[in-house]
Image (cartoon, grey):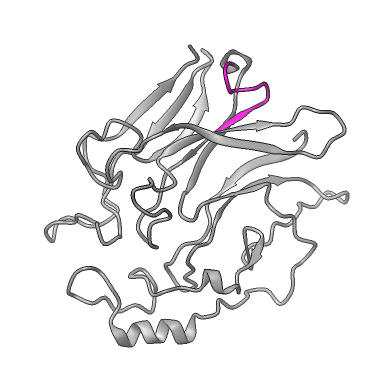
Amino acid sequence: MAGGIFIGEDGPDERGARPSNNAPDALQLGRQNPDGSPDYHGWPDRFGFLPSSQAVFNPIGGTSDDLCVRNPTPPPSCTPDSLANILKLDVPIADVLAFPPQPITSPLAIEGADSSFTGVDFVPDAFVTGPVRPGAALYSLEGDFGFSPPNATSPAPEIGHEVKLINFNQLPDTPLSLQIQNFARNTTGDQAFIAPNTNGFNRPTNLRFGPDGCAYVADYGAVRDQGEDTHVVGTGNGSLVQIPGTGVVWKICPM
């Protein structure tokens, strides 16, 4: 890790002029090439390990696609004519670049589509206990906003609305390897909206360790999303609106 930058990449969504579906989020280690230039991780024509033209990433016709004409009857959808236009003009997803500018560096690991990386920090020595090993990192996942179908099948909780732990191998002269596991997560209700017993993470948007050795997680709170279960009621309630009284800062300390 020395000399590199460790980041979480929030992948593309089914929206805009180049919509995609199922594109993963990724953990990347950025480094300099021997000539001092940055290494290249494949954007915008590589989603995770795969070319963006792979069929798994084809759009299916989301209501946030530029070519979508919204059907006025719920649940939200595109009119048949606009859906046909999306499937004709945006499938497969066309490359932006004629060729990669240099060899492509693959990500260290990938997360589920729309899990939404938002913050990452390395743990201090005071936080090392139990499953947390020296040199580990925590990262937060904000969760999806309904641009694509859910990234898990009910009753399993969707990926996101959580903090995960990464432990790295500590053996000298060995390739870098990661072990990722759940650390703190919310499994109650629909975290895009207020639900009974919503007492955990809603939208954790950043994570930093303080001088006291504890992790501080900024949580944006519950929002109305773009999905079929958007819960938007009335003309004055738009989607992606934060619900007052739900934002919070969580403090996580070792026992």
Q: Is residue 227 left or right of residue 58?
A: left
173 up-or-down from 229: above or below: above
Which of these two is toward me, 244 or 144? 144
Indicate the position of residue 126 as horizontal and vertical percent values. Answer: 59, 13
Q: Residue furthest front?
A: 155
Q: Is residue 21 left or right of residue 121?
A: left
Residue plotted at (19% across, 75% down): 72
Indicate the position of residue 204 as horizontal and vertical percent values. Answer: 41, 37
85 up-or-down from 104: above or below: below
Q: Is residue 163 left or right of residue 75?
A: right
Q: Which residues fall within the magenta stretch?
A: 129-138
What number of labels is visible? 0
Which of these two is toward me, 249 or 50? 50
Q: Is residue 71 magenta?
A: no
234 up-or-down from 206: above or below: below
Which of these two is toward me, 193 or 211? 193
Which of these two is toward me, 1 or 210? 1
